[in-house]
């Protein structure tokens, strides 16, 4: 009976806790409108993981969209302000599910750091991502990648964009056999083939995998990227979180938007990532601003399902009173029980469905019996 109430209470506690965490690190709340102009999403459709945008027409005839993404709206609305901007949000997004024929509303809590990013700022974001997952109560891991290393290897290939996209997908799927086949068919050199395959085979515990990743360096960009990853690894280790991060170059996103650090967070018991983030300087530049930006979003719905388990009892105490009892006395007794730390429901007739730890019966004469 109270399963929905318990799940909502747990969700509210998590969301409020995350909001306080981000505020303590200097992030200010950003409140969004429910609708944005459809053109914003149409022009940046490849940035969206789900392209099924829900549209409506306003009274003036303008085509609007129920927001399917938070980052695009934040970037669009804050770049005119002074930088840096450190913002957090707790918002619902709306995605169309064509297979189910319905609109899905999901909750995201996250943050965005817009302005010049140094290693300290990136480490702050990663540590906040780790603390966000710590607060779910589950065993978690964060997989880290870097588009600087991935893109420099693939940009060196003399192949069409279609072939390059195919290789990206094979790396993302960790399809080593498929990668070797396509490298062989295109007569790539052994050195190039090893680097591409290394994007799948190089990885593991963050600090130790950094050394193996040296074999992937192919130029200035990847060299600087590896140096950045090494610096982040040292900071993470200093905070005692080395065992919570792994290096995994199969974590990738659209290179037209993302250009640096990428990461995804997972908790045991949930089959998909519950946290996703990264650096998206290229997206900011599409809006005409030469600065840096990074952030992450926590998907609350799968965490809520993970956290919630059906309780053994609906209430700790059932306060069952006779109909002619003094209402003030019953309310006072109920208050005393609640202030003592037990949940309590007061009724004059016992519902058949109710599950409780103990029962207090109050008779017409005011006498009480504990059961």
Image (cartoon, helix red, strand yellow):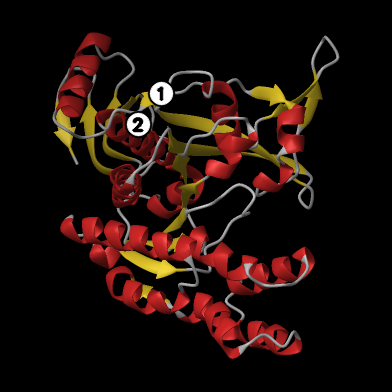
**As displayed, is residue 44 above or below residue 211?**
above
Quadrant where the image shows the C terminus: top left
- Could you tell whether 229 is left or right of 218 in the image? left
Q: Nearer the viewer, mark 2 or mark 1?
A: 1
Look at 49% across and 21% down and name the residue there: 31
Name the spot of residue 103 as percent of width and height, x first: 71, 39
Q: Nearer the viewer, residue 183 or 327?
A: 183
Look at 30% across and 57% down and name the residue there: 232
Is there a contact, CB below 8 Å, between mark 2 and mark 1?
yes
Residue sticking out furthest to the front: 220
- Could you tell whether 162 is left or right of 147 in the image? right
Q: What separation in Å lies between label 2 and label 1 (alpha carbons)?
A: 8 Å
**As displayed, is residue 272 above or below residue 37?**
below
Q: Nearer the viewer, residue 200 or 266?
A: 200
**As displayed, is residue 340 above or below residue 154?**
above
- Please tell me whether mark 2 sits on a helix, a strand or a loop: helix
Mark seen at residue 105:
none
Name the spot of residue 233 as percent of width and height, x first: 28, 61
Rate crowding at label 2 as few (under 14), some (14 to 19) or many (20 or more) other CA atoms within 10 Å. Answer: many
Q: Is residue 114 visible?
A: yes
Name the spot of residue 182 as percent of width and height, x first: 71, 83
Circle 2 residue = 19
User: Would you identify the image quadrant in which residue 57 lies?
Assistant: top right
- Please tell me whether mark 1 sits on a helix, a strand or a loop: strand
Circle 1 residue = 29
Look at 19% across and 13% down and name the residue there: 329
Q: Reading the chain from its start, which is encountered first: label 2 or label 1?
A: 2
Look at 62% across and 69% down and name the residue there: 154
Count of numbered tags: 2
Name the spot of residue 275 as percent of width and height, x first: 45, 51
């Amino acid at each position: 009976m109270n399963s929905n109430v318990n799940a909502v209470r747990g969700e509210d506690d998590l969301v409020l806790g995350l909001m306080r965490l981000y505020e303590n690190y200097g992030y200010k709340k950003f409140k969004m409108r429910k609708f944005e102009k459809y053109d914003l999403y149409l022009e940046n459709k490849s940035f969206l993981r789900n392209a099924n945008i829900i549209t409506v027409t306003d009274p003036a005839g303008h085509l609007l969209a129920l927001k399917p993404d938070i980052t695009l709206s934040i970037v669009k609305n804050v770049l005119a302000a002074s930088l840096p901007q450190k913002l957090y949000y707790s918002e619902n997004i709306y995605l169309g599910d064509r297979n189910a024929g319905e609109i899905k509303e999901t909750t995201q809590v996250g943050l965005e750091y817009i302005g010049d990013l140094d290693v300290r700022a990136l480490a702050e974001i990663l540590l906040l991502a780790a603390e966000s997952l710590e607060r779910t109560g589950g065993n978690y891991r964060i997989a880290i990648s870097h588009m600087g290393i991935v893109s420099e290897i693939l940009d060196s290939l003399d192949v069409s964009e279609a072939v390059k996209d195919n290789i990206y997908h094979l790396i993302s799927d960790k399809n080593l056999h498929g990668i070797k086949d396509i490298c062989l068919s295109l007569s790539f050199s052994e050195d190039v083939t090893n680097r591409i395959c290394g994007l799948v085979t190089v990885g593991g515990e963050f600090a130790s995998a950094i050394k193996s990743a040296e074999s992937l360096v192919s130029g200035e960009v990847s060299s600087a990227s590896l140096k950045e990853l090494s610096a982040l690894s040292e900071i993470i280790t200093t905070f005692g979180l080395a065992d919570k991060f792994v290096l995994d170059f199969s974590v990738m996103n659209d290179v037209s938007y993302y250009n640096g650090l990428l990461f995804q967070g997972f908790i045991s018991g949930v089959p998909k990532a519950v946290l996703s983030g990264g650096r998206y300087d290229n997206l900011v530049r599409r809006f005409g601003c030469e600065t840096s930006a990074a952030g992450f979003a926590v998907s609350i719905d799968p965490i809520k399902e993970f956290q919630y388990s059906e309780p053994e009892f609906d209430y700790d105490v059932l306060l069952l009173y006779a109909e002619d009892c003094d209402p003030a006395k019953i309310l006072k007794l109920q208050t005393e029980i609640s202030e003592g730390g037990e949940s309590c429901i007061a009724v004059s007739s016992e519902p058949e469905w109710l599950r409780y730890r103990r029962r207090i019966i109050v008779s017409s004469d005011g006498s009480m019996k504990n059961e």
